Image (tube, rainbow, N blue to C red):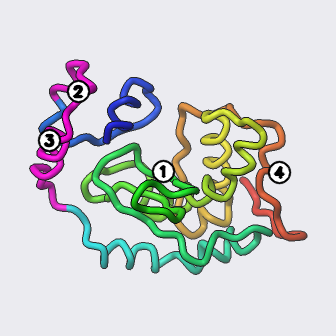
Amino acid sequence: MRWLMTQLGSGNYNFRLPPSLLHRVKGGERAFTDEELREAIVTDAEPGSSIDELRDTWASQSQSIFEAFFARMKRHPPYLLNVHVTRYGSGGSYHPTGLPGHPKPFITSRDPKVAKTAWSFNQVIVHETIEFLIHDEIRRRNTSQEAKEAMVDQFCSCNELQAVYGEYPKQSNFVGALPEDWRSYITWQDGEAPTWG
């Protein structure tokens, strides 16, 4: 939550904050005590999705998503990649080395019932999984955040994935920031690269 407060001025993300803090944040306040944050989160009573609903949403397309995209890569996602569902944040994020208390890699996604975005739950999972898979290349090539997001948007909008989960809305802030060799961030099996319309 503290990281979220520091990112509010960036303009690139549509954050959701606890409603009881919203007026203070809009007034420019960014530092809150642990107790203030805890109370704001506890009193945020907006009903969210059930875990069963979200599992069903993912299960309805997961096999087709894997076959359309991830199975065609030389480096596949891990067999198990946990998804933490949250009410707050920018939409999704990935944590390749884990965080304190969560030592294994995981991704996060905002609850689609609480924090509505242009992207479906499954699109967010795919987006963050691709970021997770290219993380080492991003660091090795010292790729900017803008170029990384534009690249991942491009991968997520390939014809094969859109045939499974519908049109992928690109982040307009990052349009045009693609590096020339963006396709080389993922190594495809021979003859298996996706297509773009």
Label 3 is placed on what type of residue?
A: Glu
Disc 1 crowd rating (10 Å Cα; few below 14, some 14-19, many 20+) is: many
Q: Which residues are magenta?
A: 23-47
Residues at discs 4 and 2 in contact (Cβ within 8 Å): no
Nearest to N terminus: mark 2 or mark 1:
2
- Rendering quarter of residue 128: bottom right
Answer yes or no: is residue 193 visible. yes
Q: In this rendering, is residue 144 above or below 135?
A: above
Residue pictured at 52% horizontal, 54% vertical: 95
Q: Position of residue 74 (x, y in %)?
A: 80, 69
Q: Position of residue 81 (x, y in %)?
A: 53, 70
Left/right of residue 175 with respect to residue 75 in the rendered view: left
Nearest to N terminus: mark 3 or mark 2:
2
Q: Circle 1 — which element?
A: strand
Label 1 is placed on what type of residue?
A: Ser
Tell which residue pokes out farthest to the top in this image: 28
Left/right of residue 103 with respect to residue 68 in the rendered view: left
Q: Which mark is residue 35?
A: 3
Label 2 is placed on what type of residue?
A: Val
Spatial CA distance of label 1 from label 4 is 22 Å
Which residue is disc 1 drawn over? Answer: 93
Residue pictured at 46% horizontal, 79% vertical: 60
Residue pictured at 64% horizontal, 40% vertical: 150
Which residue is disc 2 drawn over? Answer: 25
Answer yes or no: is residue 156 visible. no
Spatial CA distance of label 1 from label 3 is 25 Å
Which residue is disc 4 drawn over? Answer: 184
